Structure formats: structure tokens, C-alpha cells
């Protein structure tokens, strides 16, 4: 089988033998696939420099079975997202999510478009956290794990702004008292409703939504731990 | 073929770039032509594997607690160069430009490979930065996305301790031609251009 010039991003690469590498590639038309790239790590390789993560590429491959061979790679005709520092670490976090949550060979054109947009949004973002939370939410939705944010899962009533809710995995928000100590994240109705409308307004709200998404993602990831979270350093209080 | 000979051939295949054919050639060469060399190789290998560990100060490969560079008194302790692997130390030593000390990460940050800050011994580096003897931290990780992320992470750490961090330049290689250079490198070289002349 031969596939020509597909829009793609590399999510991860693994060295293989002396000069080859195995690429985990996210394509728009073919979903997430593994490709063997022969000789691209050698000193004389001309493609090695192109094969970087977060770079929009046009790739061609051929061969059958689980791991076809990369036959050609070019830069896509758009400027690559300029990521550095925190935005780059955030993008690595997103890659880790995609590698764990997307099944191989399932086509997810919409997720690809969201991913693409997200990389460019991170590029100039002031508010990285909001972008990440919205990406996580849409990712789950497009994978068919959409969150219930507006209906109390026990009573079937609409979520009310002034109440508090404990979130249950694969079930939804259930009304509870404000300061109950639970294993489940507790959020204000206001936060749930705003997040349902893709808005994150206050600092309090941000931290509630963060806990919610951590909890939900942990449920979907099972025993897998997201290592990229360790990249975010806690601010150090310096002894002046 | 004798089982021991087969075992030797299989053992040689663990070397990079050595397949069954080359392994077979090596095995026959050692046994037929150079038995002394073979004994010497075997002893040295055995000794090296048993004795060579990590330098306690910079994590590079060393058979003593402190490697030669770390224990050298003539080198500038205020400059610390961070590299990804011991081979990079050798490459930089070869240009004989740098007189400071090193810190070897033995890799780069790569969450999907399970490599985070603790796997790279960054606590040890942080202790060095906290000790106050380092004035300039030179980040010489590879110009890959992972290398850049690693450099960024460490630069934040340096900032926390008030240490100046610098990054090695990257761009057009000497003797290279612009026409053949990939767009990413060229863009980097362009944004990092320097004033010329007086």
C-alpha cells in the first residue's frame, strides 16, 4: 500500500537500531499510525532534522502490515507553531494525552484539526491553562466520552449556579453540600455551567475545573500516569 | 558449529552496527589470528564493566568517585556546562575552548519515554546551583524539541537560584550552503544573527 503526502504531526519518536527510528504519527486522514523511518538518525540523513514533533509535515509512506515505511517527508506549506518554554511543555502534555487516548488507525480528523489549532493557540497564548482545559474537554467529547456538565445525574434536574456538585466518573455531577470532604472533585454549579459554555472565568473556577479534568482523565487513562506533569515546576519561594 | 563459538558470535551482536555476519568475522578473527588481543579485550571489558560507574559530581562515566574533569583543580568551577551524554563532553573537550566543568544528564526530558526531571538527576544539579559556586550555566543540550524543553526547564531552575543561564548557538554549519539547509535551521540562524564588524 502506498499513501502520498498526508498532513501529519509526529507525536513521538523512538530510536530503532543504529540509525532508524519508529515514529508515532498523527495524520488527518488515517489517524494515529506507526511508521518506520530508516536511516533518518544518521549523520548524513537529510530528513532527520525535519522529523521533529510539533512541526506540520507532509508525509508519504508505503508497505503493509503494522509498520509501513516512511518514504518521503516535507515541511507543510505553513509556518510551524513557535513553541518555547511553558507552551512547549504543554504541547508535550497534549502529545502524551493523544498517545494514550487515541487508538491506532482510528481516523479522527476533527481531533487532528483541534490539535493543529491548539498548537498554534499555545504559540501566542497568555492563558495556557484555559486552552488545555478546553482541549481536554473537546478531546473527550470527540472520543465519545463527552462530559455531562449541566444535568444533575441523580435527579435529572438542570445544574443550578448557586449549588455545589460532586462529580462522579462516567455519571456526572450530583448535588452535595459545599464543604463535604469527598474523593470526587466538588465544583460550584457556576463553574460547571460556565465550563459547559467553554468559559473559565475566575481563579477559583480554574482550579475547580483543573481538579475535575484531572479526575476524569485519570479515569480514562487507568493505570497510566502522565509524566509530562512533572515538567511543570512549582514556583520556588526564594529566600531573599 | 561449537556451542561456545555460537555463544561468542551472539554476544558480539550486542554491539551497535554489528549484525550476524560481522559478528562471525570478529569471532573468527579473534580466535584464529589474535588470541592475545582477545584475552586483552576480554579482561579490559570485564574490568571496565565492573569498575566504571558514575562520577558523583557530574554523572559522567568514571571509575573514580570524581571524574578527571571534576577533580581537576585548574578548571573554572564557576562555569558549568550541561550536556546530554558523556560523548558530548568528549566533543566539547576536543575543541579545547571550554575550561569549566560539566554536568551530564544521560538523556533528555521525554515524558512519553518515562523520563522526567528525577530520572535526569536534576536534584543533584539543583544542589550545585544552590551551593552558589556556579556563576554561568551553559546549556548544551541538543537542538531538538526535547533538548530545548530540557534546556528551558533547567534555565528556570537556574533563575530560581539566581544563576545566569546561556544556551549554545545553533544555525548554519561551517562550510554549509544556505541552499541545502532545512527551513527550521535557517530560521533559527536568521533570528540569532549577530552584529558584524565594529
Image (cartoon, coloured by chain):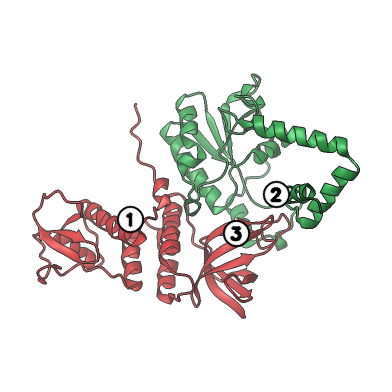
Chain colours: A red, B green
Distance (Cα) linking label 1 and label 2: 46 Å
B150 vs B11, left or right, is left
Same chain for marks 2 and 3? yes
Q: Nearer the viewer, residue A223 or B185?
A: A223
Q: Tell me, for residue B14, which label it has, or none.
A: 2
SS label for mark 3:
helix
Q: In the picture, residue A127 is in which quadrant?
A: bottom left
In 3D space, how far apart are the residues under numbered discs 3 and 1 (Cα atoms)?
Answer: 28 Å
Secondary structure type for disc 2? loop
- Same chain assignment for discs 3 and 1: no
Percent of width and height locating residue B106: 58, 41
Q: Is residue B102 above or below residue A228?
A: above
Image point 89% across, 40% down: which residue? B34
Q: Residue at position x 17%, y 56% from top?
A: A187
Residue A97: % across, % down:
41, 60
Estimate how packed mark 1 is, as few (under 14), some (14 to 19) or many (20 or more) residues with alpha carbons within 10 Å: some
**Mark found first going from the N terminus, 2 or 3:** 2
Asked whether the viewer can see residue B97, the reply is: no
Residue under pointer 3: B184
Q: Is residue B47 visible?
A: yes
Closest to the camera, between mark 1 and mark 2, is 2
The residue pinned by badge 1 equals A129
Disc 2/disc 3 C-alpha distance (Å) = 35 Å
Amino acid at each position: 500500500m502506498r499513501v502520498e503526502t498526508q498532513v501529519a504531526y509526529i507525536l513521538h519518536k523512538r530510536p530503532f537500531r543504529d540509525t532508524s527510528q519508529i515514529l508515532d504519527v498523527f495524520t488527518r486522514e488515517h489517524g494515529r499510525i506507526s511508521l518506520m523511518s530508516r536511516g533518518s538518525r544518521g549523520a548524513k540523513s537529510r530528513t532527520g532534522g525535519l522529523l521533529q514533533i510539533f512541526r506540520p509535515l507532509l508525509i508519504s509512506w508505503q508497505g503493509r502490515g503494522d509498520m509501513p515505511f516512511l518514504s518521503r517527508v516535507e515541511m507543510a506549506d505553513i509556518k510551524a507553531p513557535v513553541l518555547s518554554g511553558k507552551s512547549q511543555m504543554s504541547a508535550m502534555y497534549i502529545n502524551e494525552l493523544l498517545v494514550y487516548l487515541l487508538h491506532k488507525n482510528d481516523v479522527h480528523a476533527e481531533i487532528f484539526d483541534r490539535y493543529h489549532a491548539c498548537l498554534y493557540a499555545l504559540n501566542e497564548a497568555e492563558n495556557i491553562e484555559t486552552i488545555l482545559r478546553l482541549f481536554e474537554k473537546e478531546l473527550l467529547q470527540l472520543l465519545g466520552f463527552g462530559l455531562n456538565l449541566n444535568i444533575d445525574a441523580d435527579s435529572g434536574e438542570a445544574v443550578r449556579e448557586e449549588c455545589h456538585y460532586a462529580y462522579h466518573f462516567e455519571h456526572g455531577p450530583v448535588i452535595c453540600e459545599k464543604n463535604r470532604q469527598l474523593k470526587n472533585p466538588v465544583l460550584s454549579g457556576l463553574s460547571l455551567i460556565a465550563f459547559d459554555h467553554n468559559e473559565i472565568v475566575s481563579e477559583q473556577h480554574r482550579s475547580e475545573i483543573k481538579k475535575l479534568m484531572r479526575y476524569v482523565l485519570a479515569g480514562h487513562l487507568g493505570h497510566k500516569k502522565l509524566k509530562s506533569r512533572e515538567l511543570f515546576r512549582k514556583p520556588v519561594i526564594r529566600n531573599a | 558449529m561449537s556451542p561456545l563459538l555460537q555463544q561468542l558470535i551472539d554476544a558480539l551482536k550486542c554491539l551497535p552496527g554489528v549484525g550476524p555476519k560481522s559478528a562471525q568475522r570478529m569471532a573468527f578473527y579473534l580466535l584464529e589470528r589474535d588470541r592475545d588481543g582477545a584475552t586483552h579485550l576480554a579482561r579490559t571489558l570485564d574490568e571496565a564493566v565492573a569498575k566504571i560507574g558514575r562520577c558523583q559530581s557530574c554523572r559522567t562515566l568514571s571509575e573514580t568517585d570524581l571524574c578527571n574533569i571534576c577533580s581537576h583543580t585548574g578548571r573554572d568551577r564557576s562555569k558549568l556546562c550541561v550536556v546530554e551524554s558523556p560523548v558530548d563532553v568528549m566533543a566539547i573537550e576536543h575543541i579545547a575552548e571550554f575550561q569549566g566543568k560539566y554536568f551530564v544528564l544521560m538523556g533528555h526530558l521525554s515524558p512519553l519515554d518515562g523520563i522526567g526531571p528525577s530520572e535526569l538527576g536534576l536534584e543533584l544539579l539543583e544542589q550545585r546551583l544552590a551551593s552558589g559556586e556556579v556563576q554561568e550555566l551553559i546549556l548544551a543540550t541538543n537542538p531538538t524539541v526535547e533538548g530545548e524543553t530540557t534546556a528551558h526547564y533547567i534555565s528556570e531552575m537556574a533563575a530560581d537560584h539566581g544563576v545566569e543561564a546561556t544556551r549554545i548557538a545553533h544555525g548554519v554549519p561551517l562550510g554549509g550552503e544556505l541552499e541545502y539547509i532545512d527551513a527550521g535551521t535557517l530560521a533559527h540562524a536568521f533570528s540569532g544573527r549577530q552584529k558584524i564588524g565594529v
